[in-house]
Amino acid sequence: MKRVFLSFVVLAAILTAILLLNGCLTLEQTLRIQEDGSMLASYVYTYQEANEPVIKAALATASNAAKMDGTPVDFLDEAGIAKFCNDNGIELRQYRKSVKEGKSTVQIITLVRRNSPEKLFALGGFVQEDKALKLVLPEVNWPRDLCDKLIRLCPDFAISLTVVTPDKIKETNGKILRPDTAMWLFTPKEGLFAPAQELFVKW
């Protein structure tokens, strides 16, 4: 579960950077499970362009702190993402970055094959079974003052996970948006700082 741990170390570093800059960030992750068991994973990061240098520095510090092998992953750079995907058996399908009115948006689309390592880079690792997907988020003891500052300085901060299944959903603890789509939303007020939890969907 190394990627899950790393993802939360990275998130903590980003939160610290956000508090220093008084800027906001949203992370959207979408997993589309295909009939053959492979997954198309899409990630969208939105943040203030002026904050990018500090966010990148925070990401590098977090990667080093987590004792990640090799060069720290730069999640906001195409070459960095391409290397991460290549090193982990993930195919990078698209990388697109745009800037509008001082706000940067990075969109990444990857293909995770059925026999690929069970690793993703956002919410972390996952366990895929026959017609079921499970993702465990570890407990993180966030300092209360950090939670309070984030809620006050960046009320729009949010992380979302959307899973699209190849058939109708039979059971999930996420919010069902469509018969084949479930979503989980994490904000400072609604679960971002919750204890360990398991996200699951069955179809």
Image: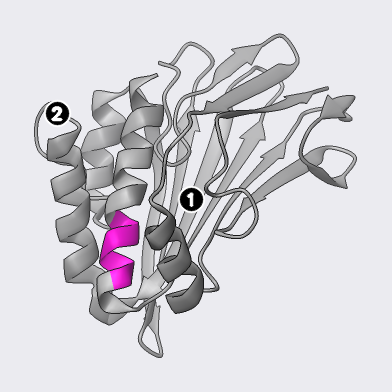
Contact, CB < 8 Å: mark 2 with mark 1?
A: no
Farthest residue in the front direction? 144
Farthest residue in the left direction? 70
Q: Residue at x 68, y 45 (%)?
A: 184
Determine whether the residue tagged by mark 1 lies in a helix, strand or loop.
strand
- Which residue does the numbered mark 1 point to in the structure image? 43
Q: Earlier in the sequence, mark 2 or mark 1?
A: 1
Q: Residue at x 35, y 87 (%)?
A: 102
Dominant secondary-structure state across the stretch colored magenta: helix
Q: Is residue 45 magenta?
A: no
Residue 25 visible to an observer of this rendering? no
Residue 130: where, in percent of width, then height? 71, 9
Residue interval drawn in magenta: 14-19
Residue 44: where, in percent of width, then height? 48, 57
**Which quadrant holds residue 53?**
bottom left
Front-most of residues 25 and 78: 25
Q: Is residue 99 above or below residue 63?
A: below
Which image quarter holds the N terminus? top left
Q: CA separation, marks 2 and 1?
A: 24 Å
Which image quarter holds the C terminus? top right
Residue 51: where, in percent of width, then height? 26, 75
Amino acid type of the residue tagged 1 in the rendering:
Tyr
Front-most of residues 151 and 156: 151
In this picture, residue 63 sits left or right of residue 38: left
Q: Is residue 111 above or below residue 182?
A: above
